[in-house]
Amino acid sequence: MATMADVARSAGVSVATVSHVLNDTRPVLPHTRRAVLDAVEELGYTPNTLARSLVTSRTRSIGLSVSAISNPYFTEILQGVEAGALEHGYSLLIADPHDDPAHERKVVQLLHERRVDGLIVAPSADPRDLVAYLGRHRMPTVFLDRVVDVPKGDGAPRFDQVCAESAEPTTRLVTHLAGLGHRRIGLVAGRPGLSTTSERITGYRHGLAAAGLPYDERLLVHGDSEAAGGERAAADLLSLAVPPTAVVTANNAMTIGALRALRDRGLSVPGDLALCCFDDFAWADLFTPRLTVVAQPSRELGSQAVRLLLDRLAAPDRPVRTVRLPCTFVHRTSCGCPERSEQPRQSDKSEKSEKSDQPQQSERASERLTKGVSRDRRRR
């Protein structure tokens, strides 16, 4: 097996120069760097990561703690983190805290004990123990997807954070549905305590206010960010004496649950209920109808988290940053709109006629839903 000394002899440089090239610890002339890298390739030299970590006190590894890795959204975030880590020569250790604060604290401690250089964490709904542990050990950490309000003051922990915008995109979904004539718009919200949940509820209420619609607490239900919870929440909405004619689901898993609840009642989208969703996913475009969604920049969230963490490792005293990335409104057909490619160019007069008919469409949908709920109750 080739050694660093073998690389140095082949490249005609000192062992120290080889070390500087491989560890980026000092600038090296381009032609010297090229000679060292060519020698590494020719000899098949593999650095001894363990020995290097003993010298540098760095393992060039990152710990990632995210729940529901099977969720396509977090899977894409993971791909972004992995790509960013590999690009900078870091390996990745992954743990799933299952959105359980006690388990979260345990897995973060295990990652810390593996001597990772820093952590990227999607915090749970109650991250107090997590924040205390990270602050006590001064662990470089980036919070991902969900932001945490940490009290400011002397000695308070410093955490960079990266997430997507949540409030404004949810407002847009609500105002879009209101623009189609819907007056009773429900929200299947996520797990209470998560910043994404509270921000999307805020966006929902802003959307209602912007459309001149009253807030009705019966139209806001929590699906706990899971498919089963989304199914229960959607069933609760459909069981109201006057159910909503349109619903916004606050993540992709709850969207699947809501669609199951509608299927079980023999209701169609958008004929009986218009549906808009937070999160795009690979098969959202394959549903019939195709799902109108807000798409989050999931891979970019992952790669941005790595950049923030590496910046923190390079300059521990730099100012704390919170980065918010914009989302994209993907207009399809589950909201009740026709396919855009199929929409003929209309005159101002025909557009006015179409808009004036939208409240009537919403009322007809409400009537169908109410009848469907009545039939369902008789069956039970």
Image (cartoon, rainbow, N blue to C red):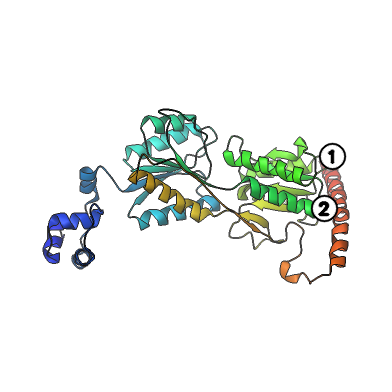
Q: Is residue 235 left or right of residue 199?
A: right
Q: Is residue 86 visible?
A: yes
The mark that comes first in sequence, 1 or 2, is 2
Q: Which quarter shows the N terminus?
A: bottom left
Task: State the residue in front, 111 or 22.
Answer: 22
Q: Residues within 10 Å of mark 2 (few under 14, many from 20)?
A: many
What residue is at 67 percent from the left and 40 percent from the top?
A: 202
Q: Residue at x 17, y 57 (%)?
A: 17
Residue 359: x percent and y percent? 86, 53
Give the numbered dot on residue 241. Answer: 1
What residue is shown at x 54% (from left), y 53% (from top)? 72
Q: Position of residue 25 (x, y in %)?
A: 24, 51
| Amino acid type, residue under disc 2 in the picture | Gly
Residue 317: x percent and y percent? 36, 39
Position in image of residue 3 (x %, y %): 15, 57
How much space separates mark 1 and mark 2, taking CA atoms? 20 Å
Callout in the foreground (1, 2): 2
Rendering quarter of residue 197: top right
Amino acid carrying label 1: it is: Ala
Q: Nearer the viewer, residue 335 or 265?
A: 335
Q: Which residue is mark 2?
A: 181
Viewer-proximal residue among 225 and 149: 149
Mark 1 is surrounded, within 10 Å at the Cα level, by few (under 14), some (14 to 19) or many (20 or more) other residues, namely few
